[in-house]
Image: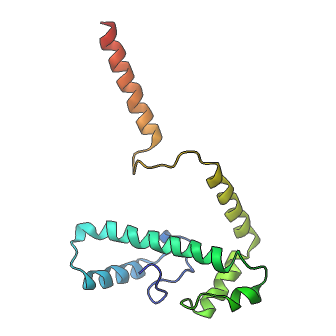
Amino acid sequence: MGRNSDFITLMYTSWKAVPLKVKKRIWKYINSKFILPKEGKGWVMTGVREAWKGYKTRIKGKHFERYNNIEDMLKNRPLDIPEVQFQKLIAYWSIPSVKALSRLNSENRKKQQHQHRMGPISFARVRNEMVIILIFYKFFLVV
């Protein structure tokens, strides 16, 4: 679903920018293929979002960053993306401010030493809980 340009194009700058109407259409289609409870909608849509983002990243790497001019990019464009959409993507990715932001984000990702794998729990929250536990143990060990 996330890689199907009939459902969702790659023209949106983020998943939050995808209109609710498009997301509802995707959910309705998936729910017509599989019998899913409403409680599973968040999980399913997260999967679609990640597939869409990953596909967009792979397309940019294989068909945009690899080539130096627009003619080569268009000649080697992915066949599952309409040419008009791909031209718009090339135009967007070629904007100097977008290139600068992409470069900055890439550099920042390379600096990361630890990936966040705790879901919605932040490191700050874990640190605060550890401090509370440490104070609790010190209090009882002293007494």
- How is the structure coloured here? rainbow
Q: Is residue 113 above or below residue 104?
A: above
Q: Specify the quadrant that holds the N terminus.
A: bottom left
Picture coordinates of residue 80, whole percent (x, y) = 53, 90
All told, the count of numbered labels is 0
Q: Is residue 41 above or below residue 143?
A: below
Relative side of 56 to 49, left or right: right
Residue plotted at (23% across, 71% down): 38
Picture coordinates of residue 112, whole percent (x, y) = 60, 48
Q: Is residue 30 above or below residue 97?
A: below
Residue plotted at (35% across, 25% down): 133
> To which quarter of the image does residue 74 belong?
bottom right
> To which quarter of the image does residue 33 belong?
bottom left
Relative side of 136 to 3, left or right: left
Picture coordinates of residue 90, whole percent (x, y) = 68, 82
Residue plotted at (26% across, 85% down): 32
Q: Specify the quadrant that holds the C terminus.
A: top left
Relative side of 128 to 76, left or right: left
Picture coordinates of residue 12, whole percent (x, y) = 55, 77
Q: Residue furthest right?
A: 69
**Between residues 43 and 14, which one lies in front from this camera angle?**
43
